Amino acid sequence: MIRVVIADDHPIVLDGLTQLFASELDLEVVRRCTNGDEALAAARAARPDVLVLDVRMPGLNGLEVLRALTAEKNRARVVLLTAQMSETEIIDAVRSGVAGIVLKETAPRVLLQCVRTVAAGESWLDSRMIQSAVETLVRRDAAVARAEKALTRRELDIVRMVATGARNREIGEKLGISEGTVKMHLHTIYEKLGIGGRVELTNYAREHALV
């Protein structure tokens, strides 16, 4: 018998998952959870074989639960159930040891097959999703490498802070330098990258996956 914990903050989805697994003789739902904190507690207490987690949940989200279980060396296998995931989230999930990723638009039988597959110790990852995520990672690494050749480490830190909305005074406080020094660094960055101002720099950082 495969012991399963399911977690989703939408009652209709949670009820649907419960009925889906209840119809299978080799699957048993041992806990139903409505948020990530409950799911993490259930994984610790019930010691399930598989957790099926919605990525977007109140409190801890599915990725955060996955990271916590991996850090604790919990043996439960995690399947993330999601409407959509960004390439960054997919990369994060794979690095954190996710066993499977299933889109909510997928047929129910596919989720059942996924749970059985990961319970047997194998992985269930959509090849197209992984390929897209890997391509994004390669582009990001290449962009960071190009930026690191042109910019110093401090300049790169400033670019990332600007892209997250930090103002010059805040950047200076975080780096332990004056606001005037931050402005000097920005002027140098603009010249090196051929950029005309703060907005353009923010767009550059986001387009080149520097943040």
Image (cartoon, rainbow, N blue to C red):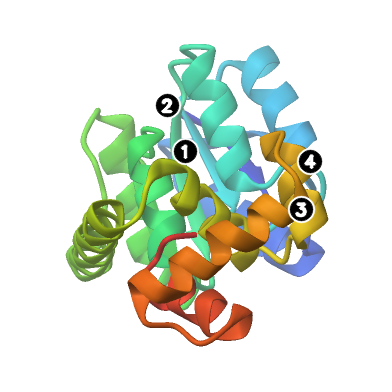
Badge 4 amino acid: Glu
CB of mark 1 within 8 Å of CB of mark 2? yes
SS at mark 4?
helix
Badge 1 amino acid: Leu
Q: Which residue is pictured at 32% across the width and 41% down the height? A: 116
CB of mark 3 within 8 Å of CB of mark 2? no
Q: Which residue is pictured at 56% across the width and 44% down the height? A: 63
Q: Earlier in the sequence, mark 1 or mark 3?
A: 1
Left or right: where does residue 174 sit relative to residue 99? right
Foreground residue, 193 or 30? 193
The residue that label 4 is drawn on is 173
SS at mark 2?
loop
Badge 2 amino acid: Met
The residue that label 2 is drawn on is 1
Q: Earlier in the sequence, mark 3 or mark 2?
A: 2
Q: Residues within 10 Å of mark 2 (few under 14, many from 20)?
A: few
Badge 3 amino acid: Glu
Q: Earlier in the sequence, mark 4 or mark 3?
A: 4
Q: Is residue 102 above or below residue 4?
A: below
CB of mark 1 within 8 Å of CB of mark 4? no
What is the CA distance from the residue labelled 2 to the residue labelled 4? 57 Å
Marks 3, 2: nearer the viewer: 3
